[in-house]
Image: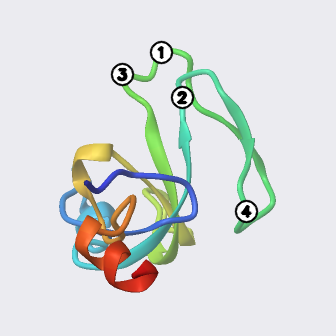
Amino acid sequence: MFQLRPGSPALIIGAQTANGRSNIGKSVELFGLCQPGERFLNPVNGVVTEMPRNAMRALWLVTGDVTAFDGQHGFAFVRAEHLMPLQPDSEPQDVRERVIG
């Protein structure tokens, strides 16, 4: 099974904004899931950011060769449904058996 987890790679597969659509097809690293009202330190620009308390949903802060909604480069905020994880949570059972056995 594949899940979105901080530090994992993902592919951007959708977007709502024009800047966001320019990121479709790009591979990114998931930094963290930002909840409405949560404050966090942006790893790219070093700015403390607060998600609006009235935000409709949590957004993933991703890093890579992407552009944010305001044109800043190196990070973006992306809905979970617009991300496809690229790394499985664990190896399939048969792979583990071959490595161990």
Question: Marks 4 and 1: in contact by CB < 8 Å?
Answer: no
Q: Amino acid at mark 2?
A: Gln
Percent of width and height locating residue 82? 24, 53
Identify the residue at image location x=81%, y=60%: 46
| Residue 38 versus residue 91 in the image, above or below | above
Q: How is the image coloured?
A: rainbow
Label placed on residue 43:
4
> Which one is earlier in the sequence, the residue at label 1 or at label 4?
4
Q: Secondary structure at mark 4?
A: loop
Q: Nearer the viewer, residue 7 or 79?
A: 7
The residue depicted at 38 percent of the width and 27 percent of the height is: 57
> Which dot, 3 or 2, sits closer to the camera?
2
Which residue position is annotated with label 1?
Answer: 54
Of pointers 3 and 4, the one earlier in the residue sequence: 4
Q: Earlier in the sequence, mark 4 or mark 2?
A: 2
Label 1: how many residues lie within 10 Å, few (<14), some (14-19) or many (20+)? few
Residues packed near mark 2 inside 10 Å, few (<14), some (14 to 19) or many (20 plus): some
Residue at 32% from the left image edge and 45% from the top image edge: 80
Height in image: 30 above or below 74? above
Q: What amino acid does circle 4 point to?
A: Pro
Image quadrant in which the C terminus is located: bottom left
Q: Which residue is mark 2?
A: 35
Q: Quadrant of residue 91?
A: bottom left
> 95 or 56: nearer the eye?
95
Q: Secondary structure at mark 3?
A: loop
Quarter of image, res 63: bottom right
